[in-house]
Image (tube, rainbow, N blue to C red):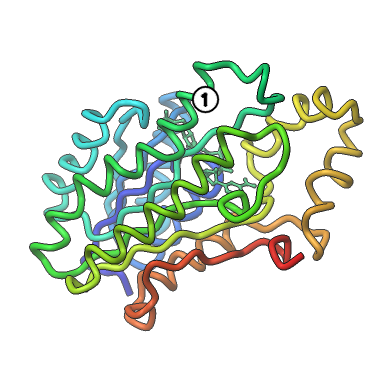
Amino acid sequence: SLSGKNAVVTGSTSGIGLAYARAFAGAGANVVINGFGTPEDIEKERAKIEQDFKVKAIYSSADMTKPAEIAAMIALGEQTFGSVDILVNNAGIQFVSPVEEFPIEKWDQIIAINLSSAFHGIRAAVPGMKKRGWGRIINTASAHSLVASPFKSAYVSAKHGIAGLTKTVALEVATHKITCNCISPGYVWTPLVEKQIPDTMKARNLTREQVINDVLLAAQPTKEFVTSEQVAALALFLCSDDAAQITGTNLSIDGGWTAA
Ligand code: NAD
């Protein structure tokens, strides 16, 4: 049970992040949710977490490209709940383009959201975790932290970076009962995946069905998408006492993708 624990999950207004937040709340943790969306949609999800799981859920509008807002999000969690015991760095975006045409501002934005935001969040949350002598840091990496695909230069670079950051932080906090791991999903059916289909159709001159079957699921030997709930269940396990000696690892949940 995570009763008495408080979690911050970045990028949790949608997809995998929302599944993490709901899984932690289901185990009794209070949660800070974060991410973009309409105020109505966000309030609906926030209120639903409180209603479904009888915990407290608050919203931080922190933009993961803004270091000061990330620090303020951690401070908000600490001030509201008394601690941030679990930090999940999950916010992420994708952009698909040949490297020579890759927009420079998209490169900078992906490095900021998918990599640097995790550094800023960890930097702000570790002092409190050390003081209390307990913590769980989980970063959503990707199969693209282990292998590459063409036309995703910024994303693959950021995700390989997340894997390195995870290992480094794990070593630094190892004697403080704080673990730091990353989870590397293959293709999970979320808005992030759906949105890259048109650009992949263009970049590879394929139909929608060909992109789904011949590009996305081609990578996954099981020929099935991973679900957000399966990823969240793994994160929940990492928060348990049974997972206290799992640290610095990169856990694949990818239907066999990176075994090939
Ligand atoms: P998603 O688009 O459903 O969710 C992304 C979340 O990040 C949303 O809540 C969005 O509002 C938020 N976000 C985006 N930019 C932000 C910013 N600047 N500041 C704050 N929040 C911001 O995508 P998802 O598929 O759930 O992706 C979540 C994570 O999982 C990402 O890091 C992604 O790289 C990773 N991932 C996804 C897949 C997949 O197949 N879907 C596979 C491997 C890894």
Tell me the quarter of the picture where residue 231 sits.
bottom right
Q: Nearer the viewer, residue 23 or 124?
A: 124
Q: Quadrant of the C terminus?
A: bottom right
- Left or right of 29 in this view: 35: right
Identity of the residue drawn at 49% across and 30% down: 110
Disc 1 crowd rating (10 Å Cα; few below 14, some 14-19, many 20+) is: some
Residue 59, image x and y in percent? 31, 37
**What quarter of the picture does the N terminus occupy?**
bottom left
Instruction: From the viewer's perspective, tell me whether residue 196 is left or right of residue 228.
Output: right
Residue at left 39%, top 34%? 43
Q: Is residue 105 above or below residue 222?
A: above
Q: Residue at x 90, y 30 (%)?
A: 206
Residue 35 picture quarter: top left
Query: How many marks can you see?
Result: 1
Q: Nearer the viewer, residue 6 or 234?
A: 234
Which residue position is annotated with label 1? 107
Which amino acid is tagged 1? Trp
In the figure, is residue 15 to the left or right of 254? Answer: left
Question: Measured from the top left, where is residue 17 in percent x and y?
Answer: 47, 47
Q: Secondary structure at mark 1?
A: helix
Q: Is residue 40 above or below residue 20?
A: above
Residue positioned 75% across, 25% down in the render = 199
Whole-percent x, y for residue 78 in the image: 15, 48
User: In the rendered view, does 26 fall on the left or right side of 96?
Assistant: left
